[in-house]
Image (spheres, rainbow, N blue to C red):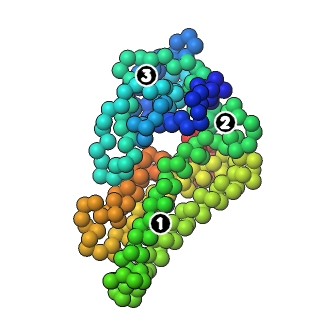
Amino acid sequence: MDHRTQAEIFAEGPDALISSSYNPFGARAEKVEGGVMLSGRWGWSSGCLHCNWVLLGGVVAEEGYRTFLVPAADYRIEDTWYTMGLQATGSNDIVIDTPVFVPDHRTHRQMDGFNGVHFQDPGVYDMPWAQVFIRVVNTAAIGAVRHAIELMRDRVGLGTTDQTKGLSDPDVLDRIARAANLADEAEAVMLRAFDEMEAKAWKPSLLDRARYRYQASLVGDRCIEAMDLIMDIGGGRSVFTGNALQDIWHDVRMARAHVANNPAGFARNYANMLMGAENADLFI
């Protein structure tokens, strides 16, 4: 964003925290001189209870989608986060009952994100913004799978009471190996994408961007597959509420519920582009 915005955010130090909610459902953004009057309700604002600011999505009439940076004094948080997974994210609702003024310099146009327009020195900031965001909302699932595999060591590994059964059971070992490989595949594809972007000075082609976008959306499905394998051999204790494996299984499934982790639309756009069509997705 604009240097004036950066100065506001970091006026009291480098540790400012900002949550977000980009779904414009129920939002009203009315353009006025020097900015926008904003009001509405936004869900899924993870970590908002710890933050000083929030980034909120909205559509400005006759212009399109923008993101608005709003200070905590201008909104309230409604406690809505009662879920079967990801409970610790605290992804409550942000509510602005009475319209508040957001100056233009605290807004970010969707096309700027798509075109790599920014106020920093050239370099990694040239990377399309969506390529960062999409990985934020899915790669934590890879770490969750890895943690579940570590927990399985406590149940079937050397030095445990179940070691004879676990280490001699080919089905248990096969499922652990397959789950670990699914996590490795997801990570390897991600790292290759970022290596390619760096090699292209952080300015990949639209076809590459569509490919990276589609590949990122598959992480949730891969991690669900891995966790299903692990839960099948998790033992009787895994059925009890609060069991660590069960918590991870729920977390990964809830992560898949995020729109960024649904591959259907991204597969369609990528396949169309492979067949010669124009890109139809601004969030790549």
Residue 225 appears in the rendering = no
At label 3, which amino acid type do we have? Asp
Label 1 vs 3, first from the N-terminus: 3
Q: Pointer 2 and pointer 3: residues touching (CB < 8 Å)?
A: no
Side of 173 where 104 appears, left or right: right
Residue hosting label 2:
115
Mark 1–mark 3 Cα distance, whole angstroms, equals 40 Å
For residue 146, the mark is: 1
**Residue 112 percent across, percent down from the top left:** 63, 32
> Splitting the image into 4 quarters, where does residue 154 fall?
bottom left
Secondary-structure class at tag 2 = helix
Location of residue 23 by image quarter: top left
The amino acid on which the numbered mark 2 sits, given as a three-letter code, is Asn
- Report the quarter where the C terminus lies: top right
Q: Give the number of the mark in front: 2 or 1.
A: 1
- The answer to whether residue 278 is left or right of residue 250 is right
Can residue 144 be seen here?
yes
Q: Earlier in the sequence, mark 2 or mark 1?
A: 2
- Left or right: residue 143 versus residue 210 is left
Residue 102 lies, in percent from the top left, at: 51, 19
Left or right: where 228 falls relative to 103: left
The residue under the point 50% across, 35% down is 18
Q: Say if 223 sits above or below 235 in the image.
A: above
Q: Label 2 vs label 1: CA separation?
A: 35 Å
Determine the residue positioned at 55% across, 44% down.
133
Disc marking residue 74: 3
Mark 1 belongs to which amino acid? Arg
Between 185 and 149, the one nearer to me in the picture: 149
- Residue at 66 percent of width and 36 percent of height: 115
